[in-house]
Image: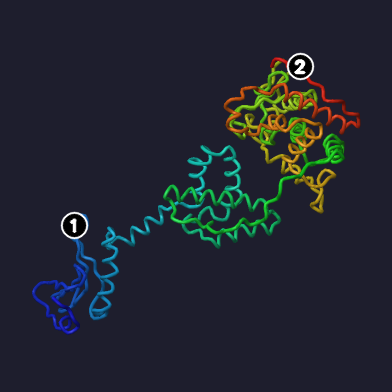
Amino acid sequence: MKLNDKTVKGMKPKDAKYFVHGDMSNDKHGFAICVYPASIKYPAGTKSWFFIYRFEGKRCFLPLGKYPTMGLAEAAQEFDRHWQVFISGKNPATVAEDKQAELEAAPTVKMLGADYIERYAKVNKKSWLEDKRILEKEIYPTWGKRKAQDIVKRDVISLLNKVVDRGAPQTANNIFKILRKLFNWSIKQDILQISPCDRVDMPAPTNTKDRALDTNEIKTVWAAIDGTTPLSMTIEVRQALKLILITAQRPAEVSGLHTREIDGEWWTIPSERSKNGKAHRVYLSAMAREIVSEAIAQARLMREVTLDREYSGYIFPCPHRAKDKPIDRHSLSKALKRNTADDGLTVLGVATFTPHDLRRTATTLMAGCKIGLEHRERVLNHTQEKLDGIYNQHDYDDEKQVALETLARKLASITTASKVGEVIPITRKTA
């Protein structure tokens, strides 16, 4: 029937409760008022508004409010709100409980991060350990227990600003890159609907990576590493920094060097450890082999391997981890930071630099010795053009050997003040 205030007020109780359905517009149905007889619970004539509907084959009665506390107009509005939920396919009677259950099941930032590491980073990124480290150190302490869906743009900006303010702008950039990847991945996985990183700018200008030590700086750093002046730097780190400069390889590849990768004068970096996913052969000059021999002797002592047994393991083992772990590549960066002067501008007697800058320095030295670009790129294991990678099967071992022998002689001339000789082609030797 057409309900109005007069008809509702005039409804009288009967022997049993009864419902009067209101005539709603736009094909809506289920709006009703119930009139109760006298009972222990209700006085005679008590009236309550209801939404009556069927859900999953079951008839449901959703109370909307009591009359006259809730008038007709207000009851109609409440009915309309629940009707919208009903036509969306949800049960209006349980939508609040369902929403609470959904909220409780929603992943925290720590849960989402762990899922991202396992399902995406480990599969697609060789640097996944760096993602994991940043999440655990920089993000979980602040957001770990919060629901990922509750993180908003202001939270991201605030977190990044704090990192910038503590004097670590490039760390803030790295945090932002990982957060952006994490939230974008979660959207693709239909875990979140929006990313709080959307339209957030990089927190700090990106440093141009062009630092290369000049000859005087190389001499100073080499002398500091070899010197007797106490440094907050382990022997393993000192040797690894030298080897980066001597071989021009990446800090992570050097720090993870294992005896199984060395065969005579050649070091083969396996595909799973190289940045471009391709195995890479590195010639070990006499200078490099001397560093490796010293490092193995030190590792033998650390691991208490007797002289009657051949040492097999990481050449730069970490003293603070299990025996099957090398020093972390970040140990090299941290060691340099620990030895930075109070003004924050110099380390080991020269302007601040990073372990990767030593690789760039080695490349610069080779260029100065007239080693061609293509041969330098082969030494660095940079990805070559696609067609060249398919059709050029020449392994460039001879050229790499010449380049790294030339680099070693140049370094020797700098660190010992002897005159560097001309570039001399070296006959290739069988590994």
Residue at x 19%, y 75% (from the top left corner) = 42
Above or below, 131 relative to 250: below
* Precedes in sequence: disc 1 or disc 2: 1
Question: Hey, which residue is sitting farthest bottom in the picture?
Answer: 6
Q: Residues within 10 Å of mark 2 (few under 14, many from 20)?
A: few
Q: Residues within 10 Å of mark 1 (few under 14, many from 20)?
A: few
Query: Is residue 418 found left or right of 168 in the rendered image?
Result: right
Q: Residue 58: which disc?
A: 1
Residue labelled with disc 2? 427
Nearer to the camera, 266 or 419 = 419
Amino acid under label 1? Lys
Above or below, 55 relative to 130: below
Residue at x 48%, y 44% (from the top left corner) = 115
Amino acid under label 2? Thr
Contact check, label 1 and label 2, Cβ < 8 Å: no
- Visible residue check, residue 111: no
What x and y, as percent, mark residue 120?
50, 41
Q: Secondary structure at mark 1?
A: strand
Nearer to the camera, 208 or 237 = 208
What x and y, as percent, mark residue 240?
74, 33
Q: Secondary structure at mark 2?
A: loop
Quarter of the rendering occupied by the N terminus: bottom left
Q: CA distance from mark 1 to mark 2?
A: 87 Å
Quarter of the rendering occupied by the C terminus: top right
- Visible residue check, residue 278: yes
Residue at x 18%, y 60% (from the top left corner) = 59
What x and y, as percent, mark residue 75?
25, 75
Query: Is residue 106 found left or right of 140 in the rendered image?
Result: left
What x and y, as percent, mark residue 113?
51, 47
